[in-house]
Amino acid sequence: MKLPRGMFILERGWLSSNNVVFIGAERTAIVDTGYCTHGEQTLALVRRLLGERPLDAIYNTHLHSDHCGGNAILQEHYPALRTHVPAAEFPRVHHWARMKTSFEATGQQCEPFRADEPVRAGDVILLADLEWQAMCAPGHHPYSYLLFNRRHGILISADALWEKGFGVVFPALDSPGGFRETRATLDMIDDLQPKIVIPGHGRPFSDVRQALKEAYSRIAYLEADPIRNAQNGIKVLLKFLLMERQRIKLTEVPQLLSGIPLVAAANRHYMHYGAIHLAHWAITQLQRVGALAVEGDMLVNVERR
């Protein structure tokens, strides 16, 4: 897949988001920085690409921990860089106690970082000497944005569109919102008619029509019965914990799941399972699709292929 000069995609595992690195005549930048436990790896990958050049900017498409977890280590190594976050999140980053609760809600971690500039809908950003327009893309996250280069038809879609679906509709785990916004974001992408999509997770793809077809089918399926989104969210959050830790004692899973606020809210609103029942259900579901294995008294992560 041919990309414009100075644009590089670092396809990561599912614990960390993909990174898009831009090397232009005037400055360098990275879009999304992965999860904090992969911070050293993220730094090494960036240094390998940039060589002696500094990293000048970070752009976070949204502030989920797997997209901004590398911010802190990159800021430490490149102290002059400027970090750009969605405008609605900008004040919360400056009051980290408020920001921290959003990571705790998913049972994930993120090292504190600073935000220097807000990104607003309609902003035109120069990356690798090309113009990219920022577009609000609520659904998976209420304050996510996409980046679109009209000249080459390239869309950096974050978790709004993957080759096979999109990210969990997190707002719908504990409230009625999210589905309509997800559909509206898909409509916007359809209107843009991109030629290449660089998703937040998984490989870049050019069969955008097929991806949108699957995404529309997926959102219709979730809208028809919101418990399906709740179940998917719970499975995804357990899988994320397992990807981070690699091994978890079976006896710890009920307490771990119950201690994640979004899991507890989704269970309370939709499933009404006891802690042990919920853990058994989630383990069974992930084991059935080959996403984990049970070895003695341990859950063991199985990498996705």
Image (cartoon, grey):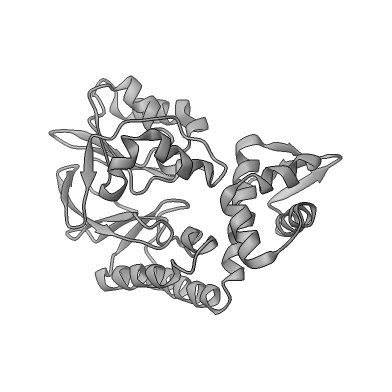
Front residue of this view, candidates 158 and 85: 85
**Residue at x 57%, y 42% (from the top left corner):** 107
Please give the count of numbered marks on the rendered protein.
0
- Left/right placement of residue 23 relative to residue 257 reads left
In the image, residue 300 lies at what x, y percent? 73, 41
Q: Is residue 233 visible?
A: yes
Q: Quadrant of residue 27?
A: top left
Residue 213, relative to residue 285: is it above or below? below
User: Which quadrant would the N terminus be assigned to in this image?
Assistant: bottom left
Reply above or below: 260 against 167: above
Residue shown at 62% from the left, 42% from the top: 241
Figure quadrant of residue 114: top left
Residue 102: horizontal and vertical position, in percent? 46, 45
Identity of the residue furthest to the right in this view: 296
Residue 25 pos. (x, y %): 13, 34
Q: Which x, y percent locates residue 172?
A: 50, 64
Residue 16 at least partly seen:
no
Q: Residue at x 68, y 65 (%)?
A: 271
Left or right position of 60 against 241 = left
> Left or right: 145 with respect to 214?
left
Seen in the picture, residue 177 relative to 83 is either above or below; the reply is below
Q: Residue at x 53, y 61 (%)?
A: 174
Closer-to-camera residue (106/219): 106
Residue placed most toward the observer, 74 or 117: 117
